[in-house]
Amino acid sequence: MAAIEFALILPTLLLILFAGTQVVAYVNATRKVELVAHSISQMISQSVPPDTSTVARVNATDLHFSYDATLVLFPYVMKDAKRQGRSWWQNISINYASIQFKAKNTACQNNSDTSTDLSPCYNANVVWTTTGTAQPGGANYRPCDTPQLPADDDATPSRVTLPRSTYGPGSLVVIDVAFDFTPTFGSGFVPAVRIARSAYVQPRYASLVNFDTTNNDGIATKCTGY
């Protein structure tokens, strides 16, 4: 009798076990995607300007170096890519952008009250953006020549919006990371779940982080006017 009961309950126990491992894997992947976004944003935002300027510059080598750090920060992406038969950099979307805020009028420019919503006072212009990184699932880079739109701070990350709380004098380094988590078990029945996280960081030592196009291999595009 006990053997029959065990045989009946075993499939349920196995299902719970496999589902539990996938939930743990998903939570770990979410944390790692957040880590990638925040770590790369720190690397780029800490660029130091020359003594004669307040504008720092990064080049293609800097972008590739920080991009490849993903293999250390999130090694699962390489294992998952191998399982799906593609290169690791085709398995994750990592996009960089520099945003400069420009006051719409003199009154806005003189408003120093950062405790209020300043998004009506500023245009958020894309200075440069990574158009040359892999874009699985569609374009995720922030487009040039189109001002970013303000959105609620708890809104889902989007390539065309910024949190309202980030608006104000100055600039931002924005890193957008998206990864499609595919369950190891039951992938034929359970669709991939997209994990998208963004980091918004002010430059630490500069007024703006611009892009140096010298020896650019196409990883990034400098926008009009910059």
Image: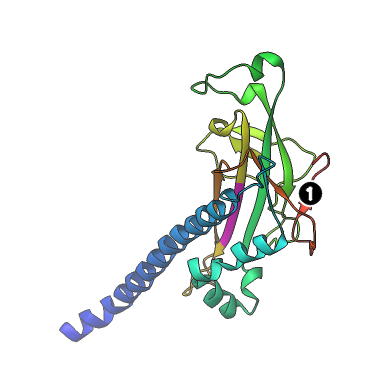
Residue 192 seen in the current view: no
How far across and down, in percent of the image, does residue 25 sit? 42, 67
* Quadrant of the image occupied by residue 105: top right
Residue matched to label 1 = 222
| Colouring style | rainbow
How far across and down, in percent of the image, does residue 131 sit? 75, 56
**Residue 82 left/right relative to 122:** left
Residue 90, placed above or below residue 167: below
Q: Residue at x 68, y 60 (%)?
A: 137
How far across and down, in percent of the image, does residue 163 sit? 57, 35
Secondary structure beneath disc 1?
Answer: strand
The 10 Å Cα crowd at callout 1, few under 14, some 14 to 19, many 20 or more, is some
Residue closer to the observer: 147 or 99: 99
Residue closer to the observer: 33 or 9: 33
Kind of residue at badge 1 = Lys
By secondary structure, the bulk of the magenta-drawn segment is best described as strand
Look at the image and give the residue range highlighted in magenta. 174-179
Residue 31 seen in the current view: yes
Is 86 colored magenta in this rendering?
no
Residue closer to the observer: 218 or 24: 218
Question: Residue furthest toward the top?
Answer: 107
Residue closer to the observer: 177 or 110: 110
